[in-house]
Amino acid sequence: MTASPTTTRQRLAALRRHATVEREDFTGRNLASVRTSQLWFTRCSFTGADLRHATLDGCSFKLCDLSGADLRGASLRGARLAGCDLRGADLRDTDLTGTVWGSVNTGTPPLGLTDVTGARFDGAILRGVEADSVIGWPFLDNGHE
Protein backbone atom coordinates (compact mmCIF):
# COMPACT_ATOMS: atom_id res chain seq x y z
CA MET A 1 0.00 0.00 0.00
CA THR A 2 1.38 3.39 -1.02
CA ALA A 3 1.16 6.24 1.44
CA SER A 4 -0.68 9.27 0.11
CA PRO A 5 1.14 12.63 0.11
CA THR A 6 0.71 14.39 3.43
CA THR A 7 1.72 17.98 2.74
CA THR A 8 0.53 20.44 0.13
CA ARG A 9 4.04 20.47 -1.35
CA GLN A 10 4.07 16.66 -1.66
CA ARG A 11 0.56 16.59 -3.12
CA LEU A 12 1.42 19.14 -5.81
CA ALA A 13 4.64 17.32 -6.66
CA ALA A 14 2.73 14.02 -7.00
CA LEU A 15 0.18 15.35 -9.53
CA ARG A 16 0.57 14.03 -13.06
CA ARG A 17 1.77 16.26 -15.89
CA HIS A 18 -0.87 18.79 -17.04
CA ALA A 19 -3.21 18.04 -14.12
CA THR A 20 -5.69 20.82 -13.39
CA VAL A 21 -5.72 22.47 -9.97
CA GLU A 22 -8.85 24.60 -9.66
CA ARG A 23 -10.00 27.11 -7.03
CA GLU A 24 -7.51 25.96 -4.38
CA ASP A 25 -6.35 28.30 -1.64
CA PHE A 26 -2.60 28.28 -1.02
CA THR A 27 -2.68 31.64 0.78
CA GLY A 28 0.35 32.07 3.03
CA ARG A 29 1.48 28.46 2.51
CA ASN A 30 5.11 27.40 2.60
CA LEU A 31 5.67 25.94 -0.86
CA ALA A 32 9.38 26.75 -1.01
CA SER A 33 11.28 24.45 -3.37
CA VAL A 34 8.10 22.69 -4.60
CA ARG A 35 8.60 20.90 -7.94
CA THR A 36 5.62 20.46 -10.25
CA SER A 37 4.92 18.80 -13.60
CA GLN A 38 3.48 21.52 -15.82
CA LEU A 39 0.28 21.92 -13.82
CA TRP A 40 -2.68 24.06 -14.90
CA PHE A 41 -3.77 26.36 -12.06
CA THR A 42 -7.16 28.06 -12.51
CA ARG A 43 -8.58 30.62 -10.06
CA CYS A 44 -6.16 29.57 -7.31
CA SER A 45 -4.93 31.89 -4.58
CA PHE A 46 -1.22 32.04 -3.75
CA THR A 47 -1.54 35.35 -1.87
CA GLY A 48 1.56 35.79 0.29
CA ALA A 49 2.69 32.21 -0.40
CA ASP A 50 6.36 31.26 -0.05
CA LEU A 51 7.37 29.90 -3.46
CA ARG A 52 11.09 30.63 -3.16
CA HIS A 53 13.17 28.33 -5.36
CA ALA A 54 10.02 26.54 -6.59
CA THR A 55 10.17 24.81 -9.97
CA LEU A 56 7.03 25.78 -11.85
CA ASP A 57 8.36 25.31 -15.38
CA GLY A 58 5.64 25.03 -18.01
CA CYS A 59 2.82 25.68 -15.54
CA SER A 60 -0.24 27.64 -16.59
CA PHE A 61 -1.81 30.19 -14.25
CA LYS A 62 -5.24 31.50 -15.26
CA LEU A 63 -7.05 34.09 -13.13
CA CYS A 64 -4.81 33.27 -10.15
CA ASP A 65 -3.95 35.60 -7.28
CA LEU A 66 -0.20 35.67 -6.63
CA SER A 67 -0.23 39.10 -4.98
CA GLY A 68 2.51 39.41 -2.39
CA ALA A 69 3.87 35.94 -3.22
CA ASP A 70 7.58 35.36 -2.68
CA LEU A 71 8.95 33.78 -5.86
CA ARG A 72 12.62 34.71 -5.33
CA GLY A 73 14.91 32.33 -7.16
CA ALA A 74 12.00 30.30 -8.58
CA SER A 75 11.97 28.85 -12.09
CA LEU A 76 8.94 29.58 -14.26
CA ARG A 77 10.54 28.74 -17.60
CA GLY A 78 7.84 28.53 -20.27
CA ALA A 79 5.02 29.31 -17.83
CA ARG A 80 1.86 31.11 -18.96
CA LEU A 81 0.16 33.72 -16.78
CA ALA A 82 -3.22 35.04 -17.95
CA GLY A 83 -5.44 37.37 -15.97
CA CYS A 84 -3.33 36.96 -12.85
CA ASP A 85 -2.77 39.37 -9.96
CA LEU A 86 0.94 39.67 -9.11
CA ARG A 87 0.77 43.05 -7.40
CA GLY A 88 3.63 43.32 -4.93
CA ALA A 89 4.99 39.85 -5.79
CA ASP A 90 8.73 39.30 -5.31
CA LEU A 91 10.19 37.89 -8.53
CA ARG A 92 13.82 38.81 -7.83
CA ASP A 93 16.31 36.37 -9.37
CA THR A 94 13.44 34.36 -10.89
CA ASP A 95 14.01 32.54 -14.20
CA LEU A 96 11.17 33.77 -16.43
CA THR A 97 12.70 32.53 -19.69
CA GLY A 98 10.00 32.06 -22.34
CA THR A 99 7.10 33.04 -20.11
CA VAL A 100 3.94 34.42 -21.69
CA TRP A 101 2.10 37.14 -19.78
CA GLY A 102 -1.35 38.10 -21.00
CA SER A 103 -5.03 38.47 -20.35
CA VAL A 104 -8.25 36.51 -20.30
CA ASN A 105 -11.26 37.86 -22.19
CA THR A 106 -13.83 38.40 -19.45
CA GLY A 107 -15.90 40.82 -21.48
CA THR A 108 -15.44 43.58 -18.89
CA PRO A 109 -11.98 45.19 -19.12
CA PRO A 110 -9.85 45.76 -17.10
CA LEU A 111 -10.97 42.51 -15.47
CA GLY A 112 -8.95 39.67 -16.93
CA LEU A 113 -5.72 41.63 -17.31
CA THR A 114 -2.54 40.49 -15.58
CA ASP A 115 -1.36 43.10 -13.06
CA VAL A 116 2.29 43.27 -11.93
CA THR A 117 2.08 46.71 -10.30
CA GLY A 118 4.72 46.96 -7.58
CA ALA A 119 6.21 43.53 -8.34
CA ARG A 120 10.00 43.28 -7.99
CA PHE A 121 11.95 41.87 -10.93
CA ASP A 122 15.57 42.73 -9.93
CA GLY A 123 17.92 40.08 -11.32
CA ALA A 124 15.12 38.14 -13.05
CA ILE A 125 15.99 36.34 -16.29
CA LEU A 126 13.67 37.70 -18.97
CA ARG A 127 14.95 35.97 -22.11
CA GLY A 128 12.18 35.41 -24.67
CA VAL A 129 9.42 36.84 -22.45
CA GLU A 130 6.17 37.86 -24.16
CA ALA A 131 3.88 40.35 -22.43
CA ASP A 132 0.61 41.69 -23.82
CA SER A 133 -1.99 43.75 -21.95
CA VAL A 134 -0.11 43.57 -18.64
CA ILE A 135 -0.82 46.35 -16.13
CA GLY A 136 2.34 47.79 -14.55
CA TRP A 137 4.77 45.95 -16.88
CA PRO A 138 8.08 47.67 -16.07
CA PHE A 139 10.07 46.68 -19.17
CA LEU A 140 10.40 48.40 -22.50
CA ASP A 141 9.60 46.74 -25.81
CA ASN A 142 6.48 44.95 -24.48
CA GLY A 143 8.40 42.58 -22.22
CA HIS A 144 11.26 41.61 -24.49
CA GLU A 145 14.77 42.04 -23.18
Image (cartoon, helix red, strand yellow):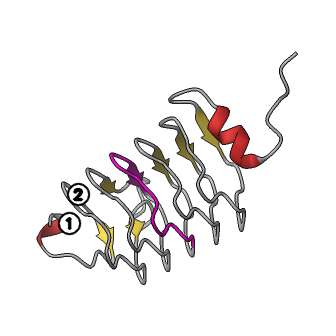
Secondary structure under the numbered disc 1 in the rendered image: helix
> Of the numbered discs in the image, which one, if any, rests on residue 5?
none
Q: Nearer the viewer, residue 23 or 92?
A: 92
On whether residue 46 falls in the magenta region, the answer is no
- The x and y percentages for residue 2 are 83, 20
What residue lies at 83% left-to-right and 41% top-to-bottom?
6
> Does the CB distance between marks 1 and 2 fall below 8 Å?
yes
Q: CA distance from mark 1 to mark 2?
A: 6 Å
Residue beneath disc 1:
143
> Of the numbered discs in the image, which one, if any, rests on residue 129?
2
Q: Residue furthest top?
A: 1
On whether residue 76 falls in the magenta region, the answer is yes
**Which of the two labelled residues, at mark 1 and mark 2, occupies the earlier sequence position?**
2
What residue lies at 36% left-to-right and 56% top-to-bottom?
103
Work out which quarter of the rendered image holds the C terminus and state it: bottom left
Sort mark 1 into few (<14), some (14-19) or many (20+) by Cα contacts within 10 Å: some
- The x and y percentages for residue 3 are 85, 27
What residue lies at 27% left-to-right and 54% top-to-bottom?
97
Work out which quarter of the rendered image holds the N terminus and state it: top right
Q: Is residue 45 left or right of residue 88?
A: right
Residue span colored magenta: 69-82
What residue lies at 79% left-to-right and 46% top-to-bottom?
7
Q: Residue furthest left?
A: 141
Q: Is residue 105 visible?
A: no
Q: Is residue 54 left or right of residue 23?
A: left
Q: Is residue 29 above or below residue 79?
A: below
Q: Is residue 70 visible?
A: yes
